[in-house]
Image (cartoon, rainbow, N blue to C red):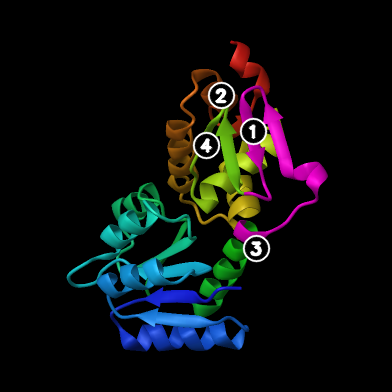
Amino acid sequence: MNPILIVDDEERIRHLVRMYLEHEGYQVDEAENGREAIEKVEKRDYSLLILDLMMPEVDGWKVCKEIREKSDIPIIMLTARGEEFDRVLGLELGADDYLVKPFSTKELVARVKALLRRSGGKLTPKTSVLVYGPLKIEKDKHRVTIGEEQINFTPREFELLYFLAKNPSRVFSREQLMETVWGYDFYGDARTVDTHVKKIREKLVDPQVRRMLATVWGVGYKFDPDAAND
């Protein structure tokens, strides 16, 4: 497995997170600012990025946006501010998860494990490819195509789409999706799921395919193959 990159201008935070991750057996690299992080990601492959938002010169939002244009590396954002706007903006820019400082190192490690498990998990060939009309989802290749066009998704967007498509017509609440796809208990921020669904729909350029990702008002979401014919 490639190393995890920790990006934070606070040396104490970097060393603390590094200590806990290395204790779990992960290789870890560090960057003390956004510019260094971008340069390192361009030169080396990483399994996951832990990214602080509030950094001088190049902040976490800019780093996330620039990296996401070139890579689908899983990203966990760290922020000292718990405001909803910060969290939603981070998710919309392509982050897969977030934690508000001060955070529990045990919780961070749990989220790292969950995200790595879901972004790098393998399934048997029988269940790794889903096809609904022009939509094809290949789990083992982390690839989504509509006809001949490949659509790029972040790891979390891909996992959410795949999970719903793997369970067609079944309705899932936001709480169930957070627990199953994100890998930990739901903490009350429904916008996390809503934001990811919105981004997935924006990328499903075919109107018939887009209708398959259906909202069940007051309940949650489902993948409805029959909706393509509505």
> How many neighbours does mark 1 have within 10 angstroms: few (below 14), some (14-19), or many (20 or more)?
some
Q: Which of marks 4 and 2 is in front?
A: 4
* Disc on the earlier residue, 1 or 3: 3
- At horizontal 61% and vertical 51% (from top left) the residue drawn is 181
User: Cα distance, mark 1 to mark 4?
Assistant: 9 Å
Which percent across, then down, holds residue 163? 66, 43
Farthest-out residue, left? 57
Q: Which of marks 1 and 4 is in front?
A: 4
Name the residue type under label 3: Arg
* Residue on which the image places disc 2: 209
User: Cα distance, mark 4 to mark 2?
Assistant: 14 Å
Please give the label number shown on residue 230: none
* Residue on which the image places disc 1: 136
- Is 127 situated left or right of 188 in this image? right
- At horizontal 57% and vertical 62% (from top left) the residue drawn is 115
Asked which secondary structure carries label 1, the reply is: strand
Q: Can residue 170 be seen in this snapshot?
A: no
Region of the chain picked out in magenta, as a range: 119-141
Q: Can residue 3 be seen in this snapshot?
A: yes
- Is 35 situated left or right of 90 in this image? left
> How many neighbours does mark 4 have within 10 angstroms: few (below 14), some (14-19), or many (20 or more)?
few
